[in-house]
Amino acid sequence: MRDDDAVLSEEQRAELMARAVEEPAVHTPGVTTLYHYSEDGGLRRFAPHVPPTNPGHPPQVWAIDEAHSPLYWFPRDCPRISVWAYDAEQQAILTDVFETEASRVCAAEISWLDRVRSGHIYRYSFDAAGFRPWEEADGQYIADDVRYPTSVDRYDDLLALHIAAGVELRFTPRLGVLMDRMLASRLPFSFVRIRDASR
């Protein structure tokens, strides 16, 4: 497939994004521990807040499950995109469209490679009992009151995190064509900090 074949029109892109929003979010049953990733290792309490990217949302504390954590193994401001498979049917599509044996692909811009390579993050762990599934995104959870982490771990090799989890990590000059392929595949996906991506 040539790159030009994967580029969607604005109308097609909007339609696929709207359809994705309507899909019910997937949450792994029986999750006991949730995580928050940050470049700040000095956080002691997590108070509800309104996310700057979603100012209409009520203040809450956000966390993510282990299966979806690769979305946050990047510097905070790094634009990144990801697509993944939950079952054999989706894996067949992922393998065909993205030419990979991995069950998840993450991608960022080449300009972020050095910052990913030299960056570090802290993983804050929480008891999942204080959270409920957020119905707008796979693997994400919310709480209405202050949450205190049960532990914090520092990771100094973000590339190694992806490798250990079997995530295929790609770097590309621009994310646009790959974003369109992810949308067109109808597979589960996530776009993070994409407003800051190169135009």
Image (cartoon, rainbow, N blue to C red):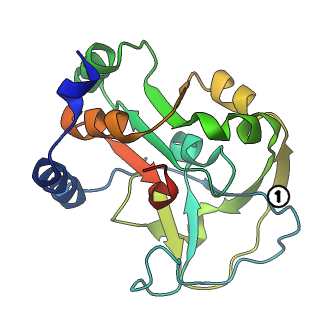
Q: Is residue 35 left or right of residue 94?
A: right
Name the image quarter holding the N terminus: top left
Decide: few, some or many residues near mark 1? Use Cα within 10 Å; few <14, some 14-19, many ≥20.
few
- Quarter of the rendering containing residue 185: top left
Above or below for 69 versus 85:
below
Residue pictured at 34% horizontal, 32% vertical = 86
- Quarter of the rendering containing residue 157: top right
**Image coordinates for residue 184, horizontal then vertical, percent:** 19, 36
Residue pictured at 16% horizontal, 49% vertical = 16
Residue 99 showing in the rendered view: yes
Above or below for 72 versus 158:
below
Tell me which amino acid carries mark 1.
Ser
Residue pictured at 22% horizontal, 35% vertical = 7
Q: Is residue 145 left or right of residue 26?
A: right
Above or below for 1 versus 124:
above
Regarding mark 1 in the picture, which secondary structure is present there? strand
